[in-house]
Amino acid sequence: MIKLVILLSLCSIEVSSICQSCFPTDFLWGASTSSYQIEGAWNTSGKGENIWDWFTHSFPEKIKDGSNGDVAADSYNKYLDDVELLKNLGANVYRLSLSWSRILPNGTVNNINQEGVDYYINLLTALRENNIEPVVTIYHWDLPLPLHEMGGWTNPLIVDFYNVYADLCFSLFGDLVKYWLTLNESISQCYFGYGEGTHAPGYQESGTLTYICAYTQLLAHAKAYRTYNDTYKQMYNGEVGVVLVSLWYEPLTDSDEDKTAAENGVQWALGLFGHPIFIGNWPQVIIDRIGNLSALQGLNASRLPEFTSEEIELIKGTYDYMGFNYYTTFYATPINNIENIELVVQSYGVDRNVNSSVDPAWTSSASGLVYDVPTGIRSMLNWVAKNFGNPRILITENGWASLPESSLNDTERITYLQGHLCNTLKAIYIDGVNVFGYLNWSLIDNFEWDGGYDVRFGLVEVDFENSNRTRTPKQSYYAFQEIIKSNCISHCFVKRDD
Ligand SMILES: *[C@@H]1O[C@H](CO)[C@@H](O)[C@H](O)[C@H]1NC(C)=O
Ligand SMILES: *[C@@H]1O[C@H](CO)[C@@H](O)[C@H](O)[C@H]1NC(C)=O
Ligand SMILES: *[C@@H]1O[C@H](CO)[C@@H](O)[C@H](O)[C@H]1NC(C)=O
Ligand SMILES: *[C@@H]1O[C@H](CO)[C@@H](O)[C@H](O)[C@H]1NC(C)=O
Ligand SMILES: *[C@@H]1O[C@H](CO)[C@@H](O)[C@H](O)[C@H]1NC(C)=O
Ligand SMILES: *[C@@H]1O[C@H](CO)[C@@H](O)[C@H](O)[C@H]1NC(C)=O
Ligand SMILES: *[C@@H]1O[C@H](CO)[C@@H](O)[C@H](O)[C@H]1NC(C)=O
Ligand SMILES: *[C@@H]1O[C@H](CO)[C@@H](O)[C@H](O)[C@H]1NC(C)=O
Ligand SMILES: *[C@@H]1O[C@H](CO)[C@@H](O)[C@H](O)[C@H]1NC(C)=O
Ligand SMILES: *[C@@H]1O[C@H](CO)[C@@H](O)[C@H](O)[C@H]1NC(C)=O
């Protein structure tokens, strides 16, 4: 019955260019940003210092163009312009993140900064007045410096600091927020921040700290989920999820080794965080691999922290929906002669054992960060549905980067958008994946972490040379506006035998 209705609403035959495929009614459309990347106002209005303030000021050489988020897109002062852009875009959701150190300058509830609280209340209220539902990420990467000084995500005490902060956010903003996200891309923070060191706080112990960070972030997420579920759910009836990310990996060849490498690529990012939440405990393949290597390396225990059975139960099932970021795809094959280094190198890369490469035929974004492989989003959505029990999924980031000098006529970005949305539709209608919304990364050009301002993801250009930080929509903004208005995309033929 349902299938029949769906079939009628799709174009099953490639007959004419008018043929369109439409998204489910009530589909959520919008764009994403994050606090440190857009707000600026780093040292005013009572905000405390966070690890990105400290990192960019102390090590400008670690940022491609030596820049920082001191002013960024100045959204602290220009948030109403951003709301206006969203409104004209036709968005019905907007994903933003809260700056922990703007609300709690010292990281703890001993000192609440009312100006920071007011900023978010004003922003959230302006969004709701324009019928834009906020999707709020409680914490993303910009840890208050005092909490870093006590070890940050390597100190298990952080779990309760985070939970107390999240509890405060629920109580302050709960009446204005329906969709909460606890953490954004834990793997990126744990790997780039604590493993590779290219992001704040800059630690380089990927074989241990990456996993310790994963352990504390999972517990922090779980406690915050339960705080909401137990204390606020009845009052506000919102939903709490977590944002996971992975690249998609295709096996380089048909060999079993390459298939295993591709699966490992996804497991070490999505599985590491998703399995404990959706299924329970770390993925067995990760427990076994790190356990085996730790023994081989003469350690008396695994480098992967072991969850107690209480912790497994605490984390399991703590989701109402899943936020999911997808950008690009790589080929995977095992690392050459890995046996020669396994004994001596304790690293996430050796544990994972993936050598990745790209197809020269793929269009690459000017930044080289993103390759346009639209089928990857569909494969990935299917992997999630199959491995995590088909949860409801909100696509929280997807996007294309360009260089600052590229024009407002960003046709490659529009092609990327078409391809990814079409494959999302196929995942929904053909594969039965439960996607209920799509958010673009990003609404406006912003500070792209170690890429500085050299990498531009925005649907809207920001003039960083101008003190007004003037905003100008690109062609992709208008293309996206059309899609939202019609709730459909053209040239996307969703056939059941695709
Ligand atoms: C989520 O993580 C991505 C990864 O780089 C980052 O660019 C983005 O700012 C984050 N989003 C939010 C809302 O925190
Ligand atoms: C805030 O930081 C800016 C640099 O971004 C600096 O010029 C200014 O003096 C600082 N203000 C205060 C109050 O420290
Ligand atoms: C917060 O930190 C600032 C700067 O380190 C310090 O001066 C202040 O006393 C702290 N406030 C509280 C309440 O701990
Ligand atoms: C771990 O070692 C055991 C025993 O040698 C082996 O059977 C298993 O395949 C290994 N697992 C992984 C993931 O390396
Ligand atoms: C394991 O080794 C670490 C140091 O490598 C030591 O601190 C710890 O006590 C050892 N644990 C056991 C159970 O032997
Ligand atoms: C959330 O609360 C509901 C209703 O009280 C309960 O049934 C559910 O088990 C809770 N979820 C978790 C993960 O505890
Ligand atoms: C990774 O694969 C490429 C070929 O795709 C090869 O040239 C390179 O040596 C491999 N690197 C490692 C570390 O295995
Ligand atoms: C944008 O560029 C494309 C191809 O490069 C061209 O066909 C199109 O006319 C341009 N559109 C605008 C509005 O300039
Ligand atoms: C989202 O924005 C990116 C630019 O970062 C663009 O490549 C992509 O096509 C956009 N998708 C949508 C749905 O607007
Ligand atoms: C900034 O905007 C104001 C008001 O629109 C305008 O008067 C001023 O000239 C602008 N400044 C710059 C540097 O463009």
Image: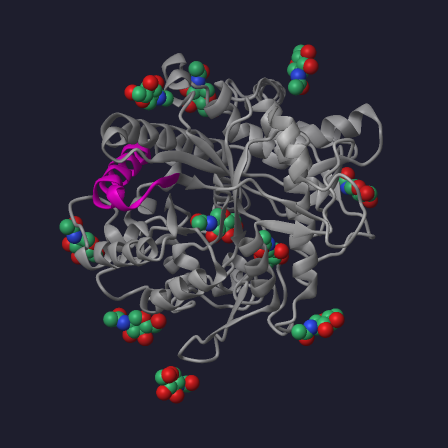
Give the tally of numbered discs: 0
Q: Specify the quadrant of the image occupied by residue 349.
A: top right
Name the residue rendered at 46%, 19% in the picture: 306
Which of the two residues, 394 or 429, is positioned nearer the viewer here?
429
What is the quadrant of the N terminus in the image?
top right
Considering only vertical position in the picture, is 324 above or below 56? above
Q: Position of residue 157 (x, y in %)?
A: 30, 33
Is residue 377 at all visible to an observer of this figure? Answer: no
Quadrant of ligand 4: it is top right
Residue range in magenta is 157-181
Q: Quadrant of the C terminus?
A: top right
**Does residue 154 appear left or right of residue 343 in this picture?**
left
Going by the image, does 136 lie left or right of 289?
Answer: left
The x, y position of residue 245, in whole percent, is 55, 40
Q: Measured from the top left, where is residue 218 in percent x and y?
A: 42, 30
| Residue ID at (62%, 18%) | 292
| SS majority, magenta | helix
Q: Decide if residue 494 is in sight here.
A: yes
Q: Residue at x 79, y 35 (%)?
A: 336
The magenta stretch spans residue 164: yes
Q: Determine the residue located farthest toward the left in the rendered image.
A: 110
Q: Is residue 282 left or right of residue 421?
A: left
Foreground of the two, 488 or 451: 488
Q: In the rendered image, which quarter is residue 429 located in? A: top right
- Which color scheme does this rendered protein use? one colour
Tell me residue 65's x, y (percent): 54, 68
